[in-house]
Image: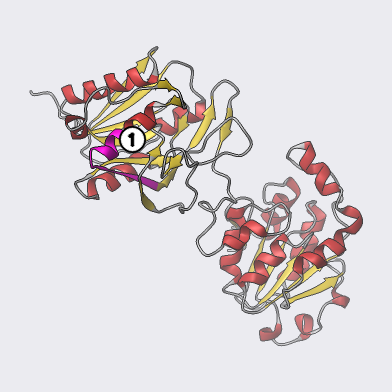
Amino acid sequence: MTNPQMGVVVGIPTSRPVTPEWAVGLATQNFPTNTNVCYAPIRGLPVDEARELIVKGAQDLKCPIIWMIDDDVEVPLGTCRQLLQTIRQAADDVMVVAGIYPSRGNDNPEPIVYQQNGHGAFWKWKKNTIFEVTGTIGTGCMMIKTELFNHIEKPWFKTIDSEHGKITDDVWFCEKVVKAGFKILADAHVICTHWDNATMKPYNMPEDSYPMLPKGKEFLKDLPDGWMSITELDWLTEEAARHKRIVELGSYMGRTTVALASSTKGEVWAIDDFRGLRNTKFNGPEKEIARHMSYQDDLFERFQKNIAGHENVKVIEADHADLAKMPPEWIRGKDEDKPDMVFIDGGHEYEEVKRDILAWKERLAPGGLLCGHDSNWPGVRRAIDELIPGWMQGPGAIWVHP
């Protein structure tokens, strides 16, 4: 029997322990059918030398594709399939396709993508798109056609110290590819986590950065302070666009209020007593908790300032269950006058959430959407488990009535 033909060599330059997340990311890759895979971990050598050996091994095996994975770059599920699909369907002059990951070491990560070396990070791209890179992209999650190395001279990868600073192996390699007349693509369907293996700290693309914001929803970056993530807000705005009479229970400083009002063609009724946080049992950095606690004294004024200009926001300063202060048509009126979407995001204790669900479930228009936030809180989870059998988990901590 002849030796099986390899389809992909997975090259791993490594000299240190990896995080569990990194190992799980690699172990759970679902390779395409009829694709033989050879793993090539190279230990104890400088990264540039390790990459040279990986390429030599792939050439010896006559393997058409090399997938470089650094020991600090965690690849998401489906990465190999996605990159293979992109590189195999690209034009013949596309020799490199890479996933994107951020820099590390500070609180402001930037994408390791440069359209012109020396001009800083390139930000004008969107997740789930594919674009050409004319400068450099990180080699930590990079797929390369092995035939490329027949057209460029060795050393293919090299790290050197120059008068202008350190030139890393990815800059060296990408410059060779471009100068040889070939193309490099960034596949932003693949967004990786970059780990600091010494501190075990992960670095991710900022969720409110231009690339990560949903297309057409760049306004989400400028929303008021609050607790909801961009992913959760994206879902909420999609639902708001389908509804015209929205009730929001718990408005805080207006983060979700503005998101809803900016997306619906109807109106948003913001209901809150504007007394602020009832406790400090929140997860997060102490500075963040302290910042939110400092908003207590002038919370309503902050809210009014934040919603200024959104004429479709109607404010009811009241307890969520004080139905006497609500428009009477919501209680006794026709179905078409009742809210067609209710978003519950007030108290987090069981009795509070139970009260809000019971009070508003009956006042929702037939076929309307009942949903809420903070399904990860014990009190919220207990209430929705009890009152909404079969509830569905949305993105983040969103819960949805089925």
What is the three-letter code of the residue carrying label 1? Cys
Quarter of the rendering containing residue 247? bottom right
Q: Residue furthest bottom?
A: 334
- Tell whether 320 sits left or right of 93: right
- Give the x, y percent position of residue 76: 44, 39
Viewport quadrant of the C terminus: bottom right
- Tell whether 327 sits left or right of 121: right
Quarter of the rendering containing residue 100? top left
Q: Is residue 213 above or below residue 301?
A: above
The span picked out in magenta is 175-187
Tell me, yes or no, if residue 281 can be seen here: no
Q: Residue furthest front?
A: 163
- Tell whether 116 sits left or right of 272: left
Q: Is residue 186 magenta?
A: yes
Name the residue beneath numbered marker 1.
174
Name the residue nearer the viewer: 125 or 234. 125
Q: Secondary structure at mark 1?
A: helix
- Give the x, y percent position of residue 344: 72, 62
Residue, x 67% and y 51% (percent of image)? 375
Name the residue nearer the viewer: 30 or 225. 225
Q: Label 1: few (<14), some or many (≥20) within 10 Å?
A: many
Residue, x 70% and y 66% (percent of image)? 258
